[in-house]
């Protein structure tokens, strides 16, 4: 069986049909990248599944890594899932991509300065064509959420009466209930007047085929980069850093891990540790709290004498 036929069979499987719609789109994108990769003068879609070798898989993975390790890891993960389906259904005997070792990516530590966040929002909200990108960024920063969940957020998640939002995170299915601060609430009220007739909170501002659709995973970073350049922001910043930025600010403010997890949706305290940086703000807070505690003990001791 040709590899492209195996992928078609995977698309008809229960496992694929049971995925969320957005996850399906992502898998289709990554699997199309895989199928259209050329190895030894032949596209992978033209390979017989049982003639795929680990060497061919490694060559393909190395080519994907040239476009970015994170991207390559997404492509190979989707490919492994599809080929594992093929093995289970006896459409092929082996999954050569299972033998390819993924490269690790260095954990990003970049955080935004508050004035850079302000520059981005001021620039984005000043132009109707970029306002929705600004709103996605604003929500990701304010609520410490992933961009993917913010670009897919729908109006039924927002309760204007209680000024709260209910988010079911796509990555781990965690649910968080969050308050909406005044500035963001005002923007959402205006947004609801302009875009409340369709389901998405911050869709692409121009309809496609008469339908308003969310920004795709591929298009959002491209539009965001142009906006950030227009705002005069450093090249090393990414919109995806805003979740980390907001979480780091909570750590620096002395918020407890349990409370942070109730915002970010993390299930394990160890997942919050990467956000705990040794900063002057954190150190100053810790030492001030210690000194206040020591002074209160000393004062109590003097009064008891």
Image (cartoon, rainbow, N blue to C red):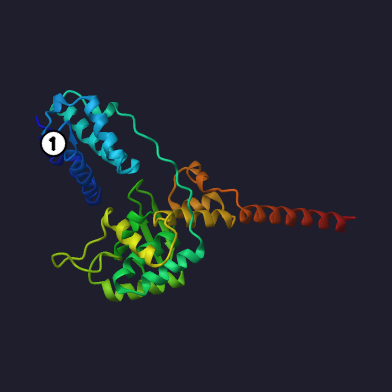
Residue at numbered disc 1 = 45
Looking at this rendering, what residue extends furthest in the front direction?
41
Residue 239 rendering spot, x and y as whole percentages: 39, 57
Q: Is residue 296 left or right of residue 158?
A: right
101 or 67, which is in the foreground? 67
The quadrant the N terminus occupies is: top left
The quadrant the C terminus occupies is: bottom right
Residue 275 rendering spot, x and y as whole percentages: 51, 48
- Name which quarter of the figure residue 31 lies in: top left
- Write the residue at 34% across / 48% down: 173
Residue 46 rendering spot, x and y as whole percentages: 11, 34
Q: How crowded is mark 1: few (under 14 residues within 10 Å), some or many (20 or more)?
A: many
Q: Is residue 163 at least partly visible in the picture?
A: no
- Write the residue at 48% across / 56% down: 245
- Name which quarter of the figure residue 7 lies in: top left
Q: Tell me if residue 254 comes above or below residue 108 in the rendering.
A: below
The tally of labels here is 1
69 or 216, which is in the foreground? 69
- Write the residue at 40% across / 59% down: 140
Element class at badge 1: helix
Q: Tell me if residue 101 comes above or below residue 221 in the rendering.
A: above
Residue 63 rendering spot, x and y as whole percentages: 26, 37
Q: Is residue 148 at least partly visible in the picture?
A: yes
- Name which quarter of the figure residue 138 lies in: bottom left
Q: In this view, does 62 lie to the left or right of 236?
A: left
Q: Tell me if residue 236 comes above or below residue 82 in the rendering.
A: below
Q: Tell me if residue 149 comes above or below residue 269 in the rendering.
A: below
- Write the residue at 12% across / 39% down: 8
Q: Is residue 44 left or right of residue 124?
A: left
């Amino acid at each position: 069986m040709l590899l492209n036929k195996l992928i078609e069979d995977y698309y008809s499987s229960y496992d694929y049909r049971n995925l969320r719609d957005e996850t399906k789109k992502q898998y289709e994108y990554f699997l199309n990248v895989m199928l259209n990769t050329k190895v030894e003068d032949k596209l992978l879609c033209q390979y017989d599944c049982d003639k795929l070798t680990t060497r061919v898989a490694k060559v393909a993975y190395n080519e994907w890594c040239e476009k970015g390790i994170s991207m390559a890891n997404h492509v190979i993960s989707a490919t492994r899932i599809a080929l594992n389906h093929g093995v289970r259904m006896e459409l092929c005997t082996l999954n050569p991509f299972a033998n390819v070792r993924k490269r690790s990516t260095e954990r990003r530590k970049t955080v935004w300065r508050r004035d850079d966040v302000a520059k981005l929002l001021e620039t984005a909200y000043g132009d109707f064509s970029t306002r929705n990108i600004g709103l996605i960024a604003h929500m990701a920063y304010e609520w410490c959420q992933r961009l993917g969940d913010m670009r897919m957020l729908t109006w039924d998640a927002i309760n204007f009466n209680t000024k709260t939002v209910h988010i079911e995170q796509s990555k781990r299915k965690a649910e968080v209930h969050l308050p909406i601060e005044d500035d963001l609430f005002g923007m959402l009220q205006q947004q609801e007047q302009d875009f409340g007739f369709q389901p998405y909170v911050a869709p692409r501002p121009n309809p496609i085929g008469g339908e308003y659709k969310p920004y795709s995973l591929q298009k959002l970073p491209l539009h965001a980069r142009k906006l950030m350049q227009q705002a005069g922001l450093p090249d090393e910043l990414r919109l995806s850093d805003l979740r980390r930025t907001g979480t780091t600010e909570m750590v620096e403010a002395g918020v407890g891990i349990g409370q942070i997890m109730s915002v970010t949706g993390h299930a394990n305290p160890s997942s919050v540790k990467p956000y705990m940086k040794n900063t002057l703000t954190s150190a100053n807070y810790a030492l001030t709290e210690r000194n206040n505690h020591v002074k209160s003990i000393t004062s109590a001791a003097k009064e008891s004498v």
